[in-house]
Amino acid sequence: MATLLSAAPFRHRHDREIFALAVPTFFALIAEPLFLLTDAAIVGSLGTQALGGLGIAGQVLLTLAAVCVFLAYGTTAAVARKFGAGDVPGGVRDGVDGLWLAILLGIAAIGIGWPLGPWMIDLLGASPEVAPYALTYLRISLLSTPFLLVIMAGTGVLRGLQDARTPLVVAVASYVGNAALCATFVFVFDWGIAGSAWSTVIAQGGGAFWYVAAIARSARREGVSLAPSLAGLRASASAGFALFLRSVSMRVVALVTTAVAARLGDESIAAHQVSYNIWALLVFAMDAIAIAGQSIVGRYLGAGDVRGTRHATRRMVEWGVMSGLLFTVVVFLVLPWAHVPFTSDPSVAALIVASLVVVALMQPLSGVTMVLDGVLMGAGDQRYLAWASLWTMLAFLPFALVIPSLATSETGGLVGLWIAFAVWILARAVTLGLRARGEAWLVTGAHRP
């Protein structure tokens, strides 16, 4: 790691282009977990079981989104390569086909998720008291899936075109609207957890419309048809398959973690919902550098600049480490009060504090992992990412699955679960670091074979 850290940590020739993308991306990314935490605080006022139900349903919805993340990440890499090679119309064409694929996948997700909702909630170990809340939230929020996937695809297009400001505006507007609607529906209309779900549907619908309008303008400017292309749809789906496998492996980790927490008790799953969202907030913040890496690395490789790719990668890893160290300090500073917005249950509060100690300690390692993942994704190295995610998932599962049988208390069980999660992050850092040190991922040109 010493070779990755420069003597002048706060001054580097690549900082300007990194920050031009990473800073607006940072605010766009933290908007989502911040307002998820707002939702958690609002729903938490309904009781421990409602908060646990939000945690269970949220993991199902996050899984549906995560397995389709290639709509954003794959599109960013492909469009950035063509942008670097000077083929802007080709990048916009990829983006239009990505939007159509997002709509089709979103409709399919509703058709599959609605009837399987009770089974998925039961699989995650929801108690009889938690399950009704989880099912209500899940079935309503499923209606927003096409909107969410359109937002993901649209974000990928604009970031590939080196535009990080529009996604920032859309994200902040959508999630501010979501928070306002959630508070109104829950506290004023007394809709309970259903009010939180309906606020998500409305807010994401507005964000999707915004992206469609922005990309339609770009298509008209570049002379690109808005009609779907069968060949383009096939190419988008094929290119995203490796990222789909990567996402499935990662979501297995998240789902197993949630399932184990649910089996430790209602207090544990409620506390885990809060700790996981705080971890996600920090990771999303560091992911700003990773997403900047997708755009920058794709552009450099599209232009054939391997040396620039190496130098920018090294600098982004340095910023990942420094960001992680900063977040470690921040979490320890707020640790005594971290539970206050979410629960008044002393048992849940103690579990939140205990698990956040592990969350704090793993932040520097998380920073390296997120940045290297973004760099390799920007290079279009999806096949390696898929296999690496599979092997790291297999390294995690034995640690997580023995937690319920070894735990002598809920606190010990939840802390042990988060230690297992940290082992997974370590395994990812090792596999990604070994790949980044090599040459195989440095493929140049407008298309990666």
Image (cartoon, helix red, strand yellow):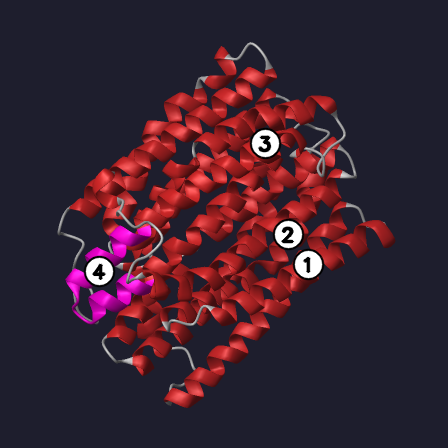
Residue 237: in magenta span:
no
The disc labelled 2 sits on which kind of residue?
Phe
Q: Secondary structure at mark 2?
A: helix
Instruction: Please state, as top left, top right, bottom left or bottom right, where the C terminus lies in the image.
Output: bottom left
Determine which quarter of the picture holds residue 208.
Answer: bottom right
- Residue that numbered label 3 is attached to: 272
Residue 312: in magenta span:
yes
Q: CA distance from mark 3 to mark 1?
A: 23 Å
Are the residues tagged 3 and 1 within 8 Å (C-beta)? no
Q: Nearer the viewer, mark 4 or mark 2?
A: 4
The disc labelled 4 sits on which kind of residue?
Thr
- Residue that numbered label 2 is attached to: 35
Residue 377 in the image: x percent, y percent? 30, 55
Q: CA distance from mark 4 to mark 2?
A: 34 Å
Are the residues tagged 1 and 2 within 8 Å (C-beta)? yes
Mark 1, other Cα within 10 Å: few <14 / some 14–19 / many ≥20: many
Residue 144 in the image: x percent, y percent? 61, 59
Question: Of callouts 4 and 1, which one flags the residue occurring earlier in the amino acid sequence?
Answer: 1
Q: Viewed as shown, does residue 268 lie left or right of 319?
A: right
Question: Of callouts 1 and 2, which one flags the residue occurring earlier in the amino acid sequence?
Answer: 2
Question: Of callouts 3 and 1, which one flags the residue occurring earlier in the amino acid sequence?
Answer: 1
- Residue 224 visible in the displayed image: yes
